[in-house]
């Protein structure tokens, strides 16, 4: 009894560490995968999504459609255990028709995972690397379904299809390898003008995130500089909220409508004015922006 008592976990962190150490070697990649998704997905991860996530081989850049198995709720417990992850019934889920979401069992699980060192239990969680991984996973899935983001968007029966089409670029911009991954997607024939997500399209997202390299890449692959939609209405207004004159100049040189209306600020000039970006205000006025 004394020996058993001495062997009890000292605290929650010790409990979680033992759970990770107890994950079989053949399940470790799956455990790392699903933990990253739960931590950094922009929408709740449902059982239906996880079924397809587990069929993606990032190392080989392949989506094994034949490996998608349905009704595998028990597999989650086998992979990571209920101490770390729980399945929650959510009748009001953001995804129509889904009823079960994967969540961390307790807020302390996230704190523990984010503090893991590289060599502890074979697991390492890093936010930027996780976004890289999720972004690559999304692109592999998109490319698998016809190399066309529009086709993925139209596969409305698949929750994961909608997620990958709407959020691939958001993960990419949050990661480290965004240029290389975006180039991979575009070389595979993805639609640079696909609509979806908070920013409406990839060009607007790249503009607001001040990623000049991605803006150039998208424009070189045919992104429509005056595409409408999203929070800012268009890429020029998005770029005008920041202090990156080079992106604003680039968009204007590519034919951006300096007086385009819509979006949160109404137009690019109002966006730059409200954000106090005087240099961009002058630039827009020089290009014919109306008061």
Image (cartoon, rainbow, N blue to C red):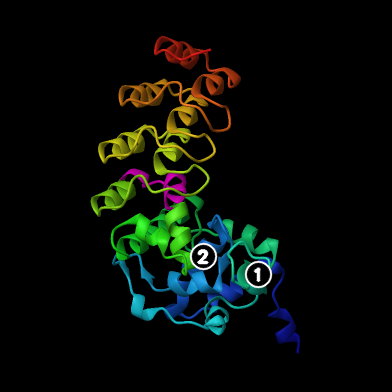
Picture quadrant where residue 108 is located: bottom right
Which structural element holds mark 1?
helix
Q: Which residues are magenta?
A: 168-179
Which structural element holds mark 2?
loop
Q: Is residue 178 magenta?
A: yes
Residue that carries the numbered disc 1 in the rendered image: 14
Alpha-carbon neighbours of circle 1 within 10 Å: few (<14), some, or many (≥20)? few
- Predominant SS of the magenta segment: helix
Give the side of residue 282 with respect to residue 99, left or right: left
Q: Nearer the viewer, residue 123 or 58?
A: 58
Residue sitting at the far left: 187
Q: Quadrant of the N terminus?
A: bottom right
| Residue 253 place in picture, x, y as percent | 31, 22
Question: Does any portion of residue 128 appear in the rendered image?
Answer: yes
| Residue 230 place in picture, x, y as percent | 51, 41
Q: Earlier in the sequence, mark 1 or mark 2?
A: 1
Q: Nearer the viewer, residue 186 or 59?
A: 186
Give the side of residue 226 with respect to residue 70, left or right: left
Residue that carries the numbered disc 2 in the rendered image: 120
Q: Relative to 198, does residue 47 appear above or below in the rendering?
A: below
């Amino acid at each position: 009894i004394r020996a058993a008592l001495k062997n009890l976990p000292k605290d929650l962190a010790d409990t979680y560490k033992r759970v990770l150490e107890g994950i079989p070697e053949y399940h470790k990649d799956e455990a790392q995968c699903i933990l990253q998704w739960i931590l950094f997905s922009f929408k709740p991860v449902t059982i239906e999504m996880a079924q397809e996530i587990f069929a993606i081989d990032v190392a080989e850049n392949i989506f094994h459609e034949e490996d998608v198995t349905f009704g595998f709720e028990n597999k989650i417990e086998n992979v990571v255990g209920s101490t770390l992850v729980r399945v929650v019934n959510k009748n009001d889920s953001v995804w129509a028709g889904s009823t079960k979401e994967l969540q961390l069992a307790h807020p302390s699980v996230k704190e523990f995972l984010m503090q893991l060192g590289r060599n502890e239990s074979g697991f390492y969680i890093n936010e930027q690397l996780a976004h890289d991984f999720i972004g690559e996973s999304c692109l592999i899935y998109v490319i698998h379904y016809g190399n066309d983001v529009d086709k993925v968007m139209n596969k409305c029966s698949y929750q994961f299809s909608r997620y990958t089409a709407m959020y691939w670029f958001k993960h990419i911009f949050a990661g480290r390898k965004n240029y290389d991954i975006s180039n991979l997607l575009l070389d595979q024939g993805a639609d640079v003008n696909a609509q979806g997500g908070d920013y409406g399209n990839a060009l607007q997202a790249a503009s607001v995130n001040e990623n000049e390299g991605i803006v150039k890449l998208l424009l070189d692959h045919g992104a429509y500089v005056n595409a409408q939609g999203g929070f800012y209405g268009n890429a020029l207004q998005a770029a005008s909220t920041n202090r990156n004159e080079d992106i604003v100049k680039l968009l204007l040189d590519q034919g951006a409508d300096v007086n385009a209306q819509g979006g949160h600020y109404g137009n690019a000039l109002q966006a730059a004015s409200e954000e106090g970006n005087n240099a961009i205000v002058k630039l827009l006025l020089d290009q014919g922006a109306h008061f």
